[in-house]
Image (cartoon, helix red, strand yellow):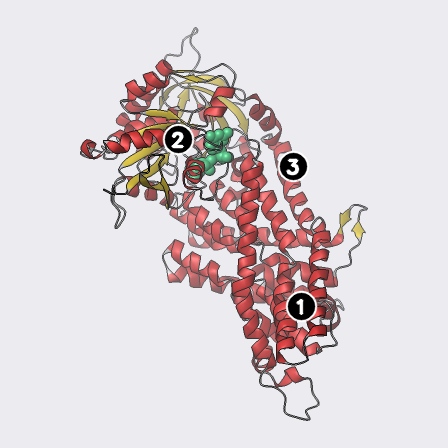
Amino acid sequence: MELPLLHLALVGTPNSGKTSLFNALTGSRQKVANYPGVTVERKEGFFVTPQGRQVSVVDLPGTYSLRGRSPDEEITRDFVLGKASGESVPDLVLCVADATNLRLTIRLLLELKRTGRPMVLVLNMFDIAARRGITVDVERLAKELGLPVVTSIAVRKGGTADLLRLTDEISAKIAAEAEANSWRALSVAELRATQREADRIIADCVSLPARPDTWTARIDAVVLHPVCGLMVLTLILFVMFQAVFAWAQPAMDLLKSSFDALGELVRATLPDGLLQSFLQNGVISGVGSVIVFLPQIILIFLFILLLEDFGYMARAAFLMDRIMGGAGLHGRAFIPLLSSFACAIPGIMATRVIDNKRDRLTTILIAPLMTCSARIPVYTLIISAFIPAKDVWGFINLQGLVMFGLYAAGIASALIVSFLIKFFMLRDYAPAPFMLELPDYKMPRLKSIAIGIYTRAKMFLVRAGTTIFSMMVLIWFLASFPQPPAGATEPAIDFSLAAIIGKALEPLLAPVGFNWQIAVALIPGMAAREVAVAALGTVYAIEGGKEAAEQIGQVLATKWSLATALSMLAWYIFAPQCASTLAVIRRETGSWTWMAVTFTYMLVLAYAASLLTYNVAVALGAG
Amino acid sequence: MTDTNDTRPHIPLGLAKRGYTGVIQHLSAREAGSALSDIELESRLIELGFVEGARVEVLHEGLVGRDPIAVRVDSITIAVRRREAMAIIVA
Ligand SMILES: Nc1nc2c(ncn2[C@@H]2O[C@H](COP(=O)(O)OP(=O)(O)OP(=O)(O)O)[C@@H](O)[C@H]2O)c(=O)[nH]1
Ligand SMILES: [Mg+2]
């Protein structure tokens, strides 16, 4: 007889290793990092126990209680209490604790017991506890709590064996045990009583050595020092942006020449005609021009992943809290905003950890102003075509400096917008409290970094192969048809649909110095920012005809004025050129209005910034 | 207050300097003037382990107005703003 699926739920305080455990059990690759509030969604996975029982396990956002103060905590509360629509309550709750730090989890567990669900306490990170000389009397703890207790090491192979064995044992007799749910929001007195009880149990069952993590203390002495700390933070960001520009270059050159060779090969082997043009101009010049940026994307993700795994993110939020407070932002907004340097979509999702609605909304509205990795291709292309690669002050690369300037402009404008929102819209704003656990540092684990990079790189390439590719096909088609009449003397592209559309839009964009080619490229650029680069690649490749085996960068350098190039950079700091981001804003705010507000304000800023940049540049003789 | 010579003075944690160590005496959310309601603030502080008898140490402070502070509470480190820390009375 086939037993029904066993439903498990992973509940626990933030950063206790729930997602690591989920990944270990199910073989998934959900995001793991060393700061509280990584998981903000419910994720389900499946596995089979050693004795062959089919199990579904749900990973949940971390929480200190079932009160549900922020959107992520509400997800956990609703799931545990069975309030989530169309969900049944879990058969067994795995309460996951960081074994080095049991106080808050045991309190949570005492609260969870009132839900009447069968439960197991998982003492995770047992390797760290052992290394620090923390000993836990597991049997006594199980007796005191009245439920099974197992140890686990989620990040080590075989580290979940005990948990699997226990799951089998429990699953055999589980149906009989379901108790009534007597949970309701705890009063202050009850909270205090549960914490007292937890402290008593811990005093009886756990012996702590008198030495806390000395490494964390030593590093924090520098990293959280009021002055040094901010210098370290600035340095990290500066090195990150310089590196993206300077270190990725060799790998990018290699990719670029491979695509050139490939294009050449296609030209040499295929007969002239539509197929040759499609492969050479549409696929290779278009998609290839985006894939070239893979090394830079990998580098920026590498930096962010290292900071996240090490445990630096929560520190950065601590350092920035008051500084961002001046601009009306909450300290908890720092991590979502920094993740937005990779991509605004996970950044906007990460705002779920902010409990105050206004703080959260402000953060969502400005997250798209952070320079996401999809802007890198646009910036890099234009910078390398127009900004000389010389050193300033002997050691800083001028191109890297301009890149840093663009990032800084994104940050500055985000702060200004946030300040204006606070000033004009939320006058009666009282600062919501900032309370954040600062986890101990952990050595970043090579495997999880590698997996992180791999998933991001794959996502980028898949996007290049799907969204960008289909946009490219569209652009190639628009730029190739209708074909010129026989005997026409103008370039073929002038007869195409692309030229017709572009020229219709040109009057709108002429004041900011954009020609019709840019106008056409901006439309598919709504699908994803980097598509604009690919679209320019295709349009100019077709326009140039088959003799033009030139790089898109060199083409731009001859076809655009410096003023147009700068105006384009200014445009991309602000422009809402990303449909997926807008969709996520709609979903997370639950309103079309806020999506429309974001789109409009960014578009207005983009136009104004480009207009200003273009006219100033022309006035200075760069037209 | 039991402010005698042989016991340490009771102060709000929000006024404590870097390096201060003490034990939590009681919570008094009314003193804090936080944006949260008294009950909500007290609940959150308890959920983060700020209960009577817990040992606290002020480890770090921020640059602007020496705010926020990083507080060691028994075995974990928590960042809070001084405004909310005013609710935690230590000695
Ligand atoms: N040494 C060691 N590290 C672990 C173990 N389990 C998790 N970690 C690390 O602890 C950190 C937090 O792990 P996560 O799995 O993201 O924690 P989480 O409970 O899902 O956190 P939230 O989603 O924020 O609630 C990561 O840096 C993990 O690599 C373990 O058993 N041993
Ligand atoms: Mg998680």
Q: Mark 1 belongs to which amino acid?
A: Tyr
Mark 2 in CB contact with mark 1 (< 8 angstroms): no
Identify the chain of the residue marked 3, using the numbered disc in the image. Answer: A
Q: Which callout, 3 or 2, points to the residue nearer the camera? A: 3
In the visual, does A169 lie left or right of A376? Answer: left
* Residue wearing tag 1: A614
Residues under labels 1 and 3: Cα distance? 34 Å
Identify the secondary structure beneath mark 1.
Answer: helix
In the visual, does A29 lie left or right of A537? Answer: left
Q: Which callout, 2 or 1, points to the residue nearer the camera? A: 1
State how many labels appear: 3
Q: Mark 2 belongs to which amino acid?
A: Ala
In the visual, does A173 lie left or right of A399? Answer: left
**Residue A120: percent from the left, percent from the top?**
32, 29
Badge 1 or badge 3: first in the primary sequence: 3
Identify the chain of the residue marked 1, using the numbered disc in the image. Answer: A
User: Which residue is depicted at the point 54% across and 71% down?
Assistant: A523
**Residue A171: percent from the left, percent from the top?**
27, 33
Identify the secondary structure beneath mark 3.
Answer: helix
Name the quadrant containing residue A525.
bottom right
**Residue A512: percent from the left, percent from the top?**
63, 71
